[in-house]
Amino acid sequence: MSHRLVLLGMPGAGKGTQAARLSEELNIPAISTGDIFRANVKGQTELGREAQKYMDAGNLVPDSVTNAMVRDRLGQPDAAAGFLLDGYPRNPAQVTELDDILQDLGVALTGVIEITADTEAVVPRLLKRAEIEGRADDDETAIRRRLEVYEEQTAPLTDIYSQRGVLVSVDGIGEIDDVTQRLLTALKNLS
Ligand code: ADP
């Protein structure tokens, strides 16, 4: 069966790590809006220039920019047989836009997986990642802001998808392999 999935979870919950593993396991592209933005910043594209100041401050890039980018990406041939979205949607307006994009493509989400974690666990992870990867938005002020934005704008999405009956939650605390196994089990229960 084809999987069309959304991965939810606070910054540092492990979405990127797990998305890469699920992508390989399920043979679908992992589409990370954060990665696409970072590639554009690095490549100094117009999109990158537009996004950078929001990202560096830990704020969301405006919906007009993000939505157009996701619409374009989901329309590409490799997403036709399924996809895993990491980092989108991130606010209720993006949920509506994603509904619209998928309707236009004639498909629907097969599931939304929330990777749960708590602030105490993720802040040290993010600070450690900052040392290793040197991401501009992994300084303490931006991390705090990203967590605030998550609470205010993204956390309500679990209610929206839960009401639709497509949400499963998986504990993101523990060994990376264990979390992957939990995710694969949760996916089997979804289908
Ligand atoms: P994290 O989840 O660790 O904060 P991401 O790589 O998912 O990291 O996102 C990094 C930044 O990219 C966000 O803080 C935001 O500025 C921007 N971004 C990513 N996805 C979106 C989105 N769906 N809408 C708006 N901005 C986004």
Image (cartoon, rainbow, N blue to C red):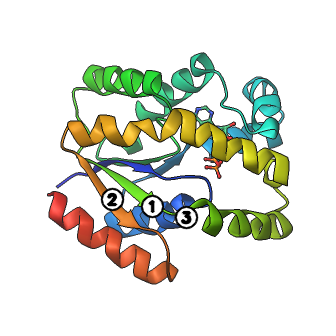
| Residue 14, numbered circle | 3
Helix, strand or loop under label 2: strand
Q: Residue 102: image x %, image y %?
A: 30, 28
Quadrant containing the N terminus in the rendered view:
bottom left
Q: Is residue 163 visible to the viewer in this orientation of the structure?
A: yes
Q: Residue 89: image x %, image y %?
A: 46, 35
Q: Nearer the viewer, residue 3 or 139?
A: 139
Q: Nearer the viewer, residue 191 or 155?
A: 155
Q: Which residue is mark 2?
A: 169
Q: Residue 20: image x %, image y %?
A: 50, 64
Name which residue lies at 22% across and 37% down: 163
Of labels 2 and 3, the one closer to you: 2
Q: Answer with the quadrant where ligand 1 appears in the image.
A: top right
- What amino acid is labelled 1 in the image? Thr
Helix, strand or loop under label 3: loop
Q: Which one is earlier in the sequence, the residue at label 1 or at label 3? A: 3
Q: Are marks 2 and 3 in contact (CB under 8 Å)?
A: no
Q: Are marks 1 and 2 in contact (CB under 8 Å)?
A: yes
Q: Which residue is mark 1?
A: 116
Among the 4 quarters of the image, the one containing residue 13: bottom right
- What amino acid is labelled 3 in the image? Gly
Q: In 3D space, how far apart are the residues under numbered discs 1 and 2 (Cα atoms)?
A: 7 Å
